[in-house]
Image: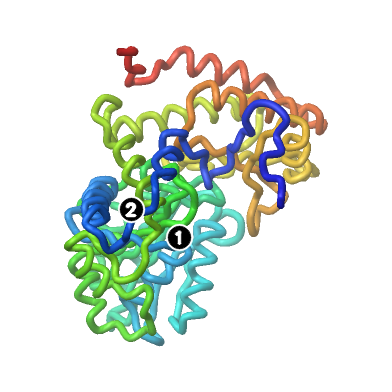
């Protein structure tokens, strides 16, 4: 038997940008007995989670729930809306945008990958004007879809999806808008209907605070209509049977029952009006991000994302000085202080590490994470301009949370 609970005392600090720590309340919900997925109790559960997840996506339209990772939901979005050889415009903001592009190519889709050149494109969000210019040039409307990442987990850039929608509209182009919000949903503001998104892809292991294993497609009426003529092969991912059976709270195959218990509990936590509902969730994440970035600034280090407006409330990428291997720093921090940080991926491998500040966090969680980072940086010989711990402590103390803790009954 593999020993997984190897931490000698206290809890491990999991500060990667997903999978994020799972609250005890959700773990308890997942421990309920597994029930018959064709029985009456399951139908009640199914309808409950389907309604709640619509509120999280801020949509009145169907949200398909798959027993799969976010990668599966990527494939579902593409295979349900496109045909072999279709031309798709994809925008490069980081490693996960690149992986989605790779998947589309493997499925037989003709992809056009645009963005700013080199590492520069991985330090900013989507530049919507580049999409508008390209679509205006596509006078024959050969481009069938525009695919962008809302929150790029590899860099910490949150893109303006409404600006992308407006760019498509300004070009008077009929392309579908497909958005990956795997790490953005339930942490950064997201409005599927209001922003005119056709398919939103997400997963369970980030802002929803669940283990990996559930993924989502939120679907617009336009996307559902497109699925009727899409010819990419699909069976497990097909929307038609799922959407129809979901009307009564069931699935056409075996769903992951215990993760759905956890999803129901997660939605209750996120939508709880006593803590400000979704707006309270978004405000918490913005505040945590500001405190962490105050610390990074005090260290005198750069953040991976240089546009203030697109810096993510979910994570912060910390760039190492020339000659310092970020993975060596991460390894020391893990071994000495039981703290996991996200590695740099793709073009920024070894150049930066990522601090996650999402989900089941609080001020002291992040103060501990920053303390581990500061000690590790010093032990690795990185010269710091000042104390990031002190700067973050001052920020959190001076900017109280907008929604106070509830008093005990």
Residue drawn at point x = 55 percent, y = 16 percent: 393
x, y percentage for residue 371? Answer: 66, 24
x, y percentage for residue 385? Answer: 70, 23
Tell me if mark 1 has few (under 14), some (14-19) or many (20+) residues whose alpha carbon lies within 10 angstroms of its own. many
Q: Nearer the viewer, residue 153 or 252?
A: 252
Q: Is residue 78 left or right of residue 39?
A: right
Q: CA distance from mark 1 to mark 2?
A: 19 Å
x, y percentage for residue 270? Answer: 32, 37
- What is the quadrant of residue 88 in the picture? bottom left
Residue drawn at point x = 51 percent, y = 35 percent: 357
Q: Nearer the viewer, residue 392 or 26?
A: 26
Residue drawn at point x = 43 percent, y = 38 percent: 28
The residue that disc 2 covers is: 161
**Label 1 secondary element:** helix
Tell me if mark 2 has few (under 14), some (14-19) or many (20+) residues whose alpha carbon lies within 10 angstroms of its own. many
Q: Is residue 200 left or right of residue 377?
A: left
Quadrant the C terminus occupies: top left
Residue 123 sits above or below residue 245 on the image: above
Residue 25 sits above or below residue 185 on the image: above
x, y percentage for residue 349? Answer: 69, 53
Q: Which mark is residue 240?
A: none
The residue that disc 1 covers is: 70
- Whichever of callouts 1 and 2 sits on the residue coming sooner in the sequence is 1
Residue 31 visible in the current orientation: yes
Residue drawn at point x = 65 percent, y = 39 percent: 340
């Amino acid at each position: 038997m593999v020993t997984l609970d190897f931490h000698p005392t206290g809890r491990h600090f999991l500060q990667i940008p997903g999978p994020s720590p799972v609250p005890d309340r959700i773990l308890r919900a997942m421990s309920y007995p597994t029930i018959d997925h064709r029985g009456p109790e399951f139908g009640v559960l199914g309808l409950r989670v389907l309604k709640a997840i619509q509120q999280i996506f801020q949509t009145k339209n169907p949200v398909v729930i798959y027993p799969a990772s976010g990668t599966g939901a990527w494939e579902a979005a593409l295979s349900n809306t496109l045909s072999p050889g279709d031309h798709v415009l994809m925008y490069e903001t980081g490693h996960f945008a690149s992986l989605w592009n790779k998947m589309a190519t493997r499925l037989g889709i003709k992809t056009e990958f645009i963005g700013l050149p080199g590492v520069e494109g991985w330090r900013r969000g989507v530049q919507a004007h580049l999409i508008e210019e390209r679509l205006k040039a596509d006078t024959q409307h050969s481009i069938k879809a525009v695919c962008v990442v809302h929150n790029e987990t590899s860099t910490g850039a949150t893109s303006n999806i409404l600006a992308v929608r407006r760019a498509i509209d300004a070009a008077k182009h009929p392309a579908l808008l497909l958005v990956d919000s795997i790490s953005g949903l339930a942490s950064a503001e997201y409005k599927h209907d209001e922003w005119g998104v056709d398919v939103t892809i997400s997963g369970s292991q980030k802002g929803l605070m669940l283990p990996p294993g559930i993924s989502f497609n939120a679907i617009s009426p336009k996307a559902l209509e497109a699925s009727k003529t899409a010819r990419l092969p699909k069976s497990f991912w097909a929307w038609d049977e799922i959407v129809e059976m979901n009307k009564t709270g069931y699935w056409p195959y075996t769903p992951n029952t215990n993760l759905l218990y956890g999803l129901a509990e997660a939605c209750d936590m996120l939508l709880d009006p006593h803590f400000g509902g979704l707006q309270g969730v978004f405000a918490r994440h913005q505040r945590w991000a500001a405190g962490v970035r105050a610390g990074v600034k005090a260290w005198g280090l750069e953040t991976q994302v240089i546009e203030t407006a697109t810096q993510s409330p979910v994570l912060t990428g910390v760039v190492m000085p020339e000659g310092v291997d970020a993975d060596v720093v991460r390894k020391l921090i893990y071994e000495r202080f039981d703290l996991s940080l996200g590695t740099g991926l793709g073009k920024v491998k070894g150049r930066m590490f990522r601090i996650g500040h999402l989900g089941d966090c609080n001020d002291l969680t992040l103060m501990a994470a920053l303390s581990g980072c500061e000690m590790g940086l010093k032990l690795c010989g990185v010269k710091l301009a000042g104390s990031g711990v002190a700067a973050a402590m001052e920020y959190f103390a001076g900017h109280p949370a907008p929604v106070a803790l509830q008093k005990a009954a």
